[in-house]
Image (cartoon, rainbow, N blue to C red):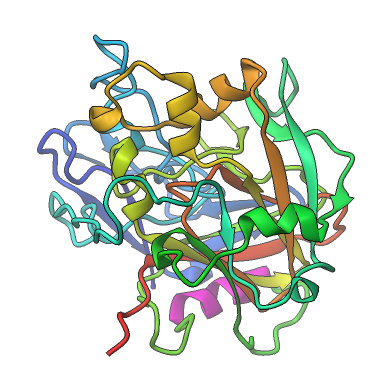
Amino acid sequence: MVQVAEDFGGIGGQPGMVVEVDPLRLVAGAGGGLLQQAFGVGQRSGGGARVARAGVRAGLDQPCEGQHPRGGVGLGALEGALRHVDGLAGKAAHQGLHGHGGQHVAAQRDVPGDAGEAGPRLSFDRFDDISDRCDIAPVRPTRREPGYDDGAVVPNGGWKPLTAADAEPHHASDSTPDSVRIELVHRPLPNIDPDDLTGRLEVAARLDPLDGRWPTTLLGCTISPGDRATTTEDSATDRRIGLHVDNFDRLTCPRRHQGRRRLCLNLGPGPRYLLIGDHDVQQICRTLHPDADLARYYPHTQDVRAYVAAGHPLRCLRIRLEPGEGYIAPTELLPHDGSTAGIGQPSVAAFWLGRLPKAP
């Protein structure tokens, strides 16, 4: 069974809600590329909680009442309430996944204050290890484009191979905390017919993603059609949201680097890409709100959009992931998305939240 839940736990004391779904009842529409729930109309719980119709609303940072750096009502402490993670079918375990209001999981403190190293930090031994799978391009805001939020941040095309000079500022050092590293991983997959997307969901439901070195509670899955510049879709609007930040752990700006990282595995059949902005959301918020007290501010995808709309520089790294390959990344800290641009096949991605165990 795949656990599928909305993020109702811990929000104003409302109870959480869980639906267990047999993967065989998750219908993958290969043409439309949507992960659909076949269990019908959603029940209601906790003052209006509902199961979403397609893709399952699950962690999209959404404006709600809270403290804005300029005062008054802003994006708020609980803005991560609904909808996203690559069209996702799942939710963080501490947010009501066991049928109650959820218990806040305190983030481990790797270093005081900000991460100390700005922007993405990619783990690799030699540049040659990553040079054939990484590209870089500028970004742009969308403007009244079909299928997208207005103002969503997307790659501008014109991809160029990542050079050693481009990669060096983003090379993780020995002192880089685990919580801010991007690590590339590989997991052998069972043989699955290329057209069997539902079979890939079954694999995800029982997979131990890192052979005991990562939590095995599946956060969710997404099926992405081929040739999409970005893949994450807000299931409430059927519009893609572009580069965004996750908000499962609900951390303020100075603590953003302390959140759990997300592990993603590409279950195929096609390759896919990880997109990562070259500035993290702490940098972005400091630039946007130089005079604000960020200690109580909760970064939001809207900050990424405002940053780009104001003309501040942001480039996008693109990392190719073949079936069986994946990443561990701080998606609460880094603007990110998936992509299948130029790829003719769909692909299934599975997600888990967690931390690597501490060395003995």
Residue located at (51% from left, 42% from top)? 280
User: Would you say residue 158 sits in the magenta stretch?
Assistant: no
Q: How far across and how far down the image is residue 325, in percent?
A: 66, 75
Q: Nearer the viewer, residue 152 or 71?
A: 71
Give the position of the C terminus as an image quadrant. Answer: bottom left
Residue located at (84% from left, 68% from top)? 132
Residue located at (71% from left, 50% from top)? 317
Q: Nearer the viewer, residue 100 or 280?
A: 280
Question: Magenta segment range?
Answer: 197-206
Q: How far across and how far down the image is residue 46, in percent?
A: 16, 38
Examine the rendered structure and indicate whether residue 44 appears above or below residue 92.
above
Residue located at (75% from left, 60% from top)? 346
User: Would you say residue 201 sits in the magenta stretch?
Assistant: yes
The image quarter containing residue 150 is top right
- Apparent side of residue 356 relative to residue 15 in the rendered image (left or right): right
- Apparent side of residue 341 relative to residue 147 in the rendered image (left or right): right
- Apparent side of residue 135 relative to residue 48 in the rendered image (left or right): right
Examine the rendered structure and indicate whether residue 218 appears above or below residue 305.
below
Magenta region's main secondary structure? helix
Q: How far across and how far down the image is residue 278, in percent?
A: 63, 44
Is residue 81 visible in the rendered image? The answer is: no
Q: Nearer the viewer, residue 150 or 106?
A: 106
